[in-house]
Amino acid sequence: MVLPWLFQLEVSNQCNSDCFICPRKHLGLKPHTMTFEEIKPIIDSLKRNGHQLTQFHPYRMGEPLLCKDLERITKYVQDNLGIWTYLFTNGSLLTEERIRSLLSVPIAQIAISVDGAGPDYEKLRKNLKWKTLVRNVNNLCKIRDEMGSKTLVIIRYSFLPETPGVENQLRAAFPIVYGIVGDKFDHWGEDRIPKLPCEFLSSHFTVDANLNLLMCCKFSTHSLGKINGDMDIMKFWQERTEPLRIETDYKRMPHDCLICNKDKD
């Protein structure tokens, strides 16, 4: 039996920025931020009925720090499912209080999503301020060391033609992060022929902010159905993803697969 190893939970599909490379505003999402009470039955079901999950990613299309219950949700997942957490955030809401709260969970890795530096950053990341980000990230690293935390802090940025040489600027601004990683720019929305079978359909268990089981962790909004704490969720995942995993004709795959950026040069 195929079971996923990565649990991606969209704790919020809302954001405090409007990045030009993000497709969130074009996806027709029903705005929502999760509460602990909403997700607890799902975690209880996974614990009760079994799983093979090893990683928890509490983010997808929104800014996870907008979720006031993020730390409580994350700790409950870790305590009950025995998995570690990778958090991806734009870093703008990392106040000292929030930093200490996150590090106390604890969280294995915190990745700060950055595009550009200085004035370029503020053009690409609308509503966010470069000086605030630099202060927040460096405070995160300093407080982590003060608390004796083992949380790894990394910077992730996209290779963009608008920001040549940005890696050197990021290294100068964030001298004490664990690493700075560049990713290729996402070409979401362009027609393509997907490579089948897609491993994301075997490895990812993705739930959006409205408790829809999604096809994968990418920008898909293709729902495989609603989940709740009364069902055997892994059995439900298995039943809904199996037809997609064995499909060999890309023309019969959901439209989201045809415009996915996975494996695209």
Image (spheres, grey):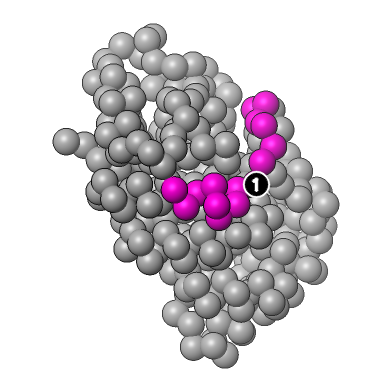
Q: In which quarter of the view is residue 119 placed?
A: bottom right
- The foreground one among 192 and 43 is 43
Image position, residue 86 (x, y; %)? 46, 60
Quadrant of the drawing holding the N terminus: top left
- The foreground one among 168 and 114 is 114
Image position, residue 222 (x, y; %)? 49, 24
**Residue at position x 38%, y 66% in the image:** 79
> Which class describes the residues within 10 Å of circle 1: few (<14), some (14-19), or many (20+)?
many
Q: Which residues are magenta?
A: 27-41
Secondary structure category for the residue under label 1: loop
Image position, residue 82 (x, y; %)? 32, 63
Residue 32 colored in magenta in the image: yes
Query: Which residue bears the numbered disc 1?
Result: 33
Q: How many marks?
A: 1
Residue 107 seen in the figure: yes
Q: Is residue 258 left or right of residue 69?
A: left
- The foreground one among 228 and 64 is 228
Residue 30 colored in magenta in the image: yes
Image position, residue 208 (x, y; %)? 53, 38
Q: Looking at the magenta stretch, what is its main secondary structure? A: loop
**Residue at position x 54%, y 28% in the image:** 221
Q: Is residue 62 left or right of residue 256?
A: right
**Residue at position x 30%, y 43% in the image:** 4
In the rendered image, the residue lying farthest to the left is 1
Is 233 above or below relative to 17? above
Q: Is residue 229 left or right of residue 89?
A: left
- The foreground one among 263 and 76 is 76
Q: In which quarter of the view is residue 21 placed?
A: top right
**Residue at position x 71%, y 33% in the image:** 25
User: What amino acid is at disc 1?
Assistant: Thr
